[in-house]
Amino acid sequence: MTELKGNVRKLHNEDGPLVWIDCEMTGLSASHDELLEVACIITDGNLEPVDGGVSYVINSERQKLENMSEWCVKTHKDTGLYEECLAPSAHKLEWVRNAVMTYIIQHVPKQGTACLAGSTVHADKRFLEKFMPEIIDHLHYRIVDVSSIKELVRRWYGPQQVWPGREDRTRHRALDDIKGSIEGMHGADCRA
């Protein structure tokens, strides 16, 4: 049962909590790429957020940013993330790691209760396993991957049923992408 302690909404198993995480990275290989931005929104099983979520830009060296693929350089420059990673306001990875974990525990205190959720979140999970393993350890072993749901809807009901009337929600900024995924799930109609 959901409870409110202070101004913090705490979710329990019966609330069906989902921890939505999106990461922006220097590339897609967790073995040699790095995190640039991490955002998190926590919802109950009805996709109602507990609050507005958190988002943090991680400090990076210019050389690492310049060594990204052409697509990553263009995309992260276009969104402003490239320069934000170089700004004094960007956070150290360890600080972000602690902040995100604190946020999750604040709303979902019991380990193994909430599922990791997001669009193509299995890719984000690889980076979390490497850079923020305590988050993965705190969450349930199951994940809710919006891209899997979209693929099934496309196969079962046709491409016109995948978020009908909605444009692609991917903006390549972590918090925006989570909001787009949640909004897309709210608008999904999988009925035949």
Image: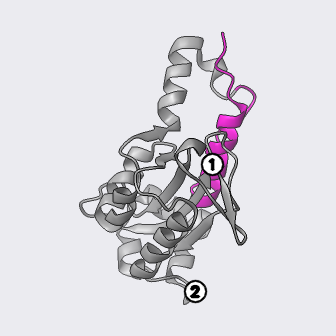
Labels in figure, total: 2
Q: Quadrant of residue 7?
A: bottom right
Instruction: List the residue tagged with mark 1.
Output: 1
Residue type of the residue flagged with mark 1: Met
User: Compared with residue 91, is residue 69 higher up or lower down, i.e. above or below?
Assistant: above
Q: Position of residue 38 (x, y in %)?
A: 50, 65
Is any part of residue 127 visible from this angle? no
Decide which of 80, 147 is in the foreground and name it: 147
**Residue placed furthest toward the left:** 31
Is 59 in front, or is 185?
A: 185
Q: CA distance from mark 2 to mark 1?
A: 38 Å
Q: Is residue 121 above or below residue 24?
A: above
Say left or right for 83 vs 2: left
Mark 1 Cα-neighbour bin, 10 Å: few <14, some 14–19, many ≥20 = few
Residue 11, percent from left and from top: 59, 54
Say which amino acid is labelled 2: Ser
Q: In the visual, does 147 lie left or right of 192?
A: left
Residue that label 2 marks: 89
Asked if the residue at tag 1 contacts the one at tag 2, i.e. Cβ–Cβ closer than 8 Å, the answer is no
Q: Is residue 166 magenta?
A: yes
Residue 31 visible in image: yes
**Residue 91 colored magenta?**
no
* Residue 46 falls left or right of residue 108: right
Instruction: Give the SS element for disc 1.
Output: loop
Q: Seen from this angle, which residue lies furthest bottom?
A: 88
Mark drawn on residue 129: none
Q: Residue 63, percent across and down? A: 36, 79
Q: Relative to the observer, which residue lies in front, 147 or 160?
A: 147
* Mark 2 vs 1, N-terminal side: 1
Residue placed at 30% from the left, 55% from the top?
29
- Start-end of magenta stretch: 164-192
Secondary structure beneath disc 2? loop
